[in-house]
Image: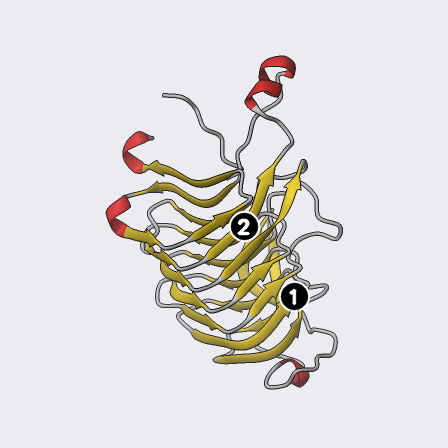
Amino acid sequence: MKKLLIACGALLALALIGTSSASAAVCQPTSFVRDSHVLTAAVYNQPAVTGEVDATGCDIGVATDGGNDTVVSDADVHGAKYFGVATKDDGSSTTIEASQIHEIGDAPFNGSQHGVGVDWEGGSTGSLDSSHVFDYQKNGVVVTGDGTSADVTNNEVNGLGPVAFIAQNGVQYSFGAAGEVSRNSITDNDYTGCSNRDAAKTGCTPFVAAGLLLYDVDPPEGSRFRNLYRDDQRNEIVVPSASL
């Protein structure tokens, strides 16, 4: 088989919820861990989030875990290093609607494999609808892990365009996750760093960027239709469980 490498205490400043203006975030420790580091969040286990969430200096903009539910609506989440909105744990749920999530990653962006606009993992559930995800470092939306399920519908997901430092994916479902992906505009996920031709000449590792990546998932567990792709290196990449 041809090997395909895919770059594959809740305290909150009151200005962050229910208003369009924000002060500096209070970064609170969470149960999320990445790179041997306990991640912090600007908003943690809050039932409702709206208005501006300036997560500059925090790892996550809005985090939900431990069986809690969060509704993010008419929100502007930006400035976090690892995730814009992140949900994990069985029984946890986040619903996102009519919001924008952007500027997620390092400053400036680089090849580190983090910086995801919206993430569901660890058996959590939810939905992303009628929202705009853009200016992310690695992926726009990720739904990953057995038992994790989220629908991604009616959104705009815009990558950085042609870049050589990282292979982005617009929407990714992986490792047994399920859900519907429909009526989205997914654009500008294009990796230029190492093509197959470059690899033959130089020995570099060729990665592929995709508008929609389905990796180690069973096709019957999800549905995808009426998505519009533009200027992605590959519109869709499907790597089913049976092929691994």
Instruction: Return the residue found at the far top.
Output: 201
Pointer 2 or 1: first along the chain: 1
Work out which quarter of the rendered image holds the C terminus and state it.
top left
The image quarter containing residue 231 is top right
- Of 29 and 101, nearer the camera is 101
Judge whether 2 appears above or below 6 on screen. above
For the residue marked with disc 1, what is the amino acid? His
Residue 171 placement (x, y as % from top left):
47, 51
Element class at badge 2: strand
Tag 2 residue: 187
- Of 231 and 150, nearer the camera is 231
**Residue at (30, 37) in percent of width and height:** 241
**Residue at (74, 79) in percent of width and height:** 23
Judge whether 116 appears above or below 11 on screen. above
In space, the residues marked 2 and 1 are separated at their CA atoms by: 20 Å
Tag 1 residue: 78
Q: Quick check: can you spot residue 238?
A: yes
Mark toward the viewer: 2 or 1: 2
Q: Quick check: can you spot residue 84?
A: no
Instruction: Return the residue found at the far left.
Output: 220
Residue 19 placement (x, y as % from top left):
63, 85
